[in-house]
């Protein structure tokens, strides 16, 4: 199988590695605007052959993966399609609607449009760059594909099977639905982190607090604030309608809470928080664990290396940590660790294992986390 | 010194332990509505003597700490004050304005009001309950104190010194300012987590996505969704004016972004994200590290125990981890670790140390995190 890669960064490079590791007799030809990246990709074996242009990388390929930033996609996809042949062209961008709309309204022929299938692998938290590419980053990951009516069935099937071979789970989704879902679960959290961090910075500055203390809930909520401005500017802009709609829904959600506050409605407020708890639990279970998730709190005294000890003990016993957060005390020497483990028996085993290390561990029920968190 | 504790849960119990560990010849008398909690506190040595009523715990005390849920504070504080004597009464609740307003407008005498100083230690991420209490949870923690004009200077000084002795950093703040700051950095993040998780749950249900995939930004932003409904209902309600104001400011911030989206203003959007990055960095540095913080991404292949290995290597070398997040791949076997370490040289050392373990590590600059995070 001949694979073309336009863009050999983290994702493109990982496609190259995964193809080499998991598909027999594959030949990967790559192009990148950065000559340095292309050379590294060759050296690391992500590509077998470096090409001088995007069109060259697509020529004669069975599949061409366009792995460049969102704003460069329309041009690069058109170049790949223009190379002709029986090649299915796909991309890996975070938004799909704008790209497809561009192709459909453009001077791209119907035959060419039928060879394009939008794609979006949910992977790549690693630092960018081909030097961080690995063949296993797609293992078990959802890889959204957005076929449209005009899409060639034969080519779609080829892409679908290849993505399965790379270790991912290809999942067909309507492009607009994709963009709406991403707006909710990814673009909105990024947007609100940016707003929150700005509000806190100006509030704390205004209050002239010498020692602002934000707390772990704030830190968690703002961890993605300011991620990669150039990339996120384009994600926001290419999905602006869906994000605007989500922001509006979100504002209505905030206003619902505002209503409970204004009417001093304790019952409604408590039910609203309980519902949030149930929703978070449900999403975690569906997404990360495929089964029940339990939250544990480990109380850790002044002792270094504790995260290591706890992780090692659970790892050795095969207890699956699906999420972890540190709540260090101000002296950074002690504090608490929140752990989410999957499976009810895992929670019991974790309590026992961590207990043996000498740290009090509690399975968190609704009532058992203090108010100062 | 005689200390009275009304409420011997996580915070009350920890005050007892810290007092025993750090103050000479201290005698702690405690009361709790839960007889079981009181007995455990006695057994664990958090209190020296169990009392039958709140008033009894306050009698003859030099300081009485009222450590019960926010909604029970007005009653308990009044009981403590009614016990009379030269006792300074303080509380540890998350909101201050409502309690103080209640005391000032009530039938509490001016002399009694002068003996009350509101307090709020920023500690207690551990699971609730006296069994998780420890003498070191206040070490280095900010402990807000909210003296008012009428507050007795002598008693305020006694409280201030004692809180220093417990290991905390007493920090005087106007009660309304306290409530505003908490609304921004704690109550708002909790509120928005609750809204976000509900919106995602209904969106994903509506789209009939079999496999909702929320991504790490969502997980971080919603980690506190649904925390302790009864406690948080009361925090929200007792600080409802400040929270409502923060929600309104927040909605204006969201609308600012909405404006950039609607006007397709790429430049403004990018500057807005860059500003968020700078703000997050500034807050992290001020709060957690007291100096520069660097973000690292560690790319981790399929290998268990890696969190342990990394934490141990850095711990042994004295590199201070101020924040950590896991970005597991869908197979839960590989992925990325985000680490924030303090000090520029710490970043270099961490890259070197983790590199020796065989994992590629990158110091994250503005451009170096992929878009799929």
Image (tube, coloured by chain):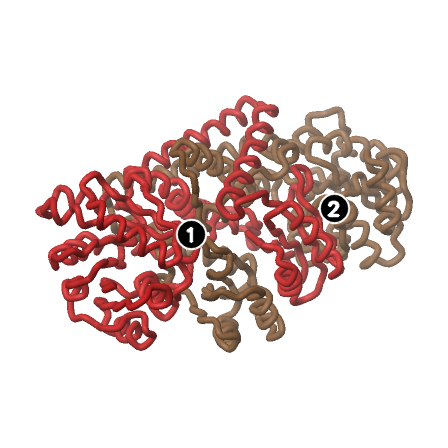
Chain colours: A red, B brown
Q: Is residue B358 left or right of residue A348?
A: left
Q: Is residue B183 above or below residue B349?
A: above
Question: Does residue A273 lie above or below A238 as drawn?
Answer: above
* Figure quadrant of the C terminus of chain B: bottom left
Q: Nearer the viewer, residue A181 or B322?
A: A181
Discs 2 and 1 lie in a common subunit: no
Q: Is residue B264 above or below residue B108?
A: below
Q: Which residue is mark 1?
A: A225
Count of picture labels: 2
Q: Position of residue A25 (x, y in %)?
A: 29, 68
Look at 39% across and 57% down and name the residue there. Answer: A167
Decide which of B356, B21 is in the foreground and name it: B356
Do we see residue A332 in this rendering?
no
Q: Which image quadrant for residue A30?
A: bottom left
User: Badge 2: few (under 14), some or many (20 or more) residues near its Cα, within 10 Å?
Assistant: many
Label 1 marks which chain's residue?
Answer: A
């Amino acid at each position: 199988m001949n694979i073309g890669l336009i863009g050999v960064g983290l994702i493109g490079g990982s496609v190259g590695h995964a193809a080499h590791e998991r598909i027999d007799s594959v030949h990967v030809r790559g192009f990148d605007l950065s000559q340095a990246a292309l050379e590294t990709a060759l050296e690391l074996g992500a590509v077998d052959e470096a090409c001088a242009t995007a069109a060259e990388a697509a020529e004669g390929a069975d599949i061409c993966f366009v792995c460049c930033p969102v704003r460069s996609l329309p041009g690069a996809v058109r170049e790949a399609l223009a190379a002709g042949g029986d090649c299915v062209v796909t991309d890996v961008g975070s938004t799909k609607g704008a790209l497809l709309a561009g192709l459909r309204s453009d001077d791209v022929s119907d035959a060419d449009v039928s060879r394009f299938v939008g794609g979006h692998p949910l992977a790549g938290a690693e630092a960018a760059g081909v030097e961080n590419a690995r063949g296993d980053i797609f293992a078990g990951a959802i890889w959204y594909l957005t076929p449209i009516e005009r899409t060639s069935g034969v080519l779609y099937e080829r892409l679908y099977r290849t993505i399965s071979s790379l270790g991912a789970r290809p999942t067909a989704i309507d492009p607009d639905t994709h963009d709406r879902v991403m707006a909710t679960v990814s673009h909105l959290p990024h947007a609100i982190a940016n707003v929150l961090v700005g509000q806190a910075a100006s509030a704390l500055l205004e209050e002239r607090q010498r020692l602002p203390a934000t707390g772990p809930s704030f830190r968690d909520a703002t961890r993605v604030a300011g991620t990669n401005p150039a990339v996120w500017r384009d994600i926001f802009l290419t999905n602006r309608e869906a994000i605007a709609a989500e922001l509006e829904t979100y504002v209505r959600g905030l206003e619902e809470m505002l209503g409970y506050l204004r009417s001093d409605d304790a019952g409604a407020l408590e039910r609203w928080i309980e519902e949030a708890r149930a929703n978070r639990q449900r999403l975690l279970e569906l997404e990360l664990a495929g089964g029940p998730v339990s939250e544990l709190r480990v109380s850790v005294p002044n002792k270094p290396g504790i995260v290591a000890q706890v992780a090692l003990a659970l790892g050795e016993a095969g207890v699956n940590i699906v999420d972890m957060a540190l709540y260090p005390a101000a002296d950074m020497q002690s504090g608490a660790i929140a752990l989410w483990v999957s499976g009810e028996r895992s929670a019991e085993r974790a309590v026992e294992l961590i207990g043996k290390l000498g740290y009090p561990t509690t399975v968190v029920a609704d009532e058992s986390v203090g108010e100062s968190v």
